[in-house]
Amino acid sequence: MLMKILQMESSRRHERNPMSEILIPAELITRLRAARRIAVLTGAGISAESGVPTFREAQTGLWARYNPEELATPEAFRRNPRLVWEWYAWRQTRVRQAEPNPGHLALVDMEHRIAEFTLITQNVDGLHRRAGSHQVLELHGNLFRAKCLDEDRPVENWPDSEEIPPRCPRCGALLRPDVVWFGETLPASVLRAAEQAAAHADAFFSIGTSALVYPAADLPFTALGTGATVVEINPQPTPLSPHVTFSLNGPAGVILPELVARVWG
Ligand code: OAD
């Protein structure tokens, strides 16, 4: 059934903006204008144009010989807490130097125009909030927060010390980044809120994510299952691509501003 809809969509007329080469299907514009509830899932690709490397890109320089997936695990931290802490410190430095890009800003604009808007991100870089988005669910935590390894509680301040990683001022256990690592469960209330937003959305966007990591990768399917229009924005095909209602192939920082201007401008 869905495949039939897809074939129908792809044969529909595309509106061409004389100012650009971006093709935005007329039917998508109509559906988005009618949408009251929108949920958006973002991944590392939305921050790529801010200069933050995507997760599966090779790391450069110092970190070139490490596979990020081998550093983002509880086992890696147990094996070498200093290495993992320093990798996150390096990522913090990269992100501090970065600025939100037109893709982030277009999502701020979208939030202002939609009655019920939820931005679900797998990114830990905090760039959506820095851009000005308010309804943000951070599924995988945030690079700039730390928590106690033993008590699993957020820790905001700790005394200066030479030790890396620093220690929890309450119990003396090691501090760790407050991010979700492979093999760990996502914060339950955040995941529940994301699932509800996906289930109730009239339109759902999957932007800049390889759609490989679960449970985030399930969210577009939840939205499809309840009849939402699902739109993917990505320069590359992903395992989600054959299932979506509309695929917009290209960089989010170019497509999103154009889409927002065409639909709500
Ligand atoms: P990935 O690095 O797996 O995928 C990034 C996606 O962004 C790819 O599909 C690219 O084609 C796409 N992309 C690149 N540049 C883009 C651009 N300018 N505009 C739009 N898309 C672009 O990153 P994620 O899918 O976010 O999890 O990875 C998901 C999770 O896997 C991460 O949150 C992390 C990782 O392992 C944890 O750390 C738990």
Image (spheres, rainbow, N blue to C red):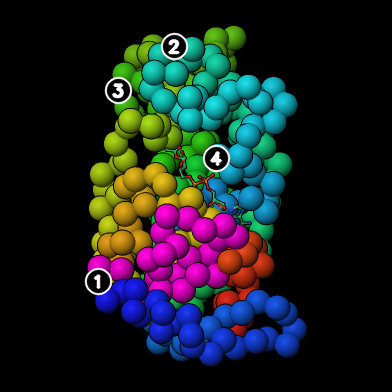
Is residue 232 in the magenta section? Answer: yes
Residue at 39% of width from left, 44% of height from top? 213
From the image, tell me which residue sits under label 4. 55
Above or below, 155 against 3 in this view is above
Pick whichever of labels 2 and 4 is earlier in the sequence.
Answer: 4
Image quarter where the C terminus lies is: bottom right
The amino acid on which the numbered mark 4 sits, given as a three-letter code, is Phe
* Residue type beneath disc 3: Glu
Q: Residue furthest right?
A: 19
- Left or right: residue 249 versus residue 145 is right
Q: First in sequence: mark 4 or mark 3?
A: 4
- How crowded is the residue under tag 3: few (<14 C-alpha within 10 Å), some, or many (20+)? few
Q: Which residue is mark 2?
A: 79
Q: Earlier in the sequence, mark 4 or mark 1?
A: 4
Alpha carbon distance from label 4 to label 3: 28 Å
Alpha carbon distance from label 2 to label 3:
19 Å
Q: Earlier in the sequence, mark 1 or mark 3?
A: 3
Residue 179: quarter of image: top left
In magenta, the rendered stretch is 224-248
Secondary structure, mark 3, is: loop
Residue at the spot x=48%, y=34% of the render? 145
- Are the residues flagged by discs 2 and 4 in contact, CB closer than 8 Å? no
Circle 1 Cα neighbour tier, 10 Å, few/some/many (<14 / 14–19 / ≥20): few
* Image side of residue 13 versus residue 117, left or right: right
* Neighbourhood count class around disc 2 (C-alpha, 10 Å): few under 14, some 14–19, many 20 upward: few
Mark 4, secondary structure of its residue: loop
Q: Which mark is residue 151?
A: 3
Q: Is ligand 1 closer than 8 angstroms to the Cβ of mark 4?
A: yes
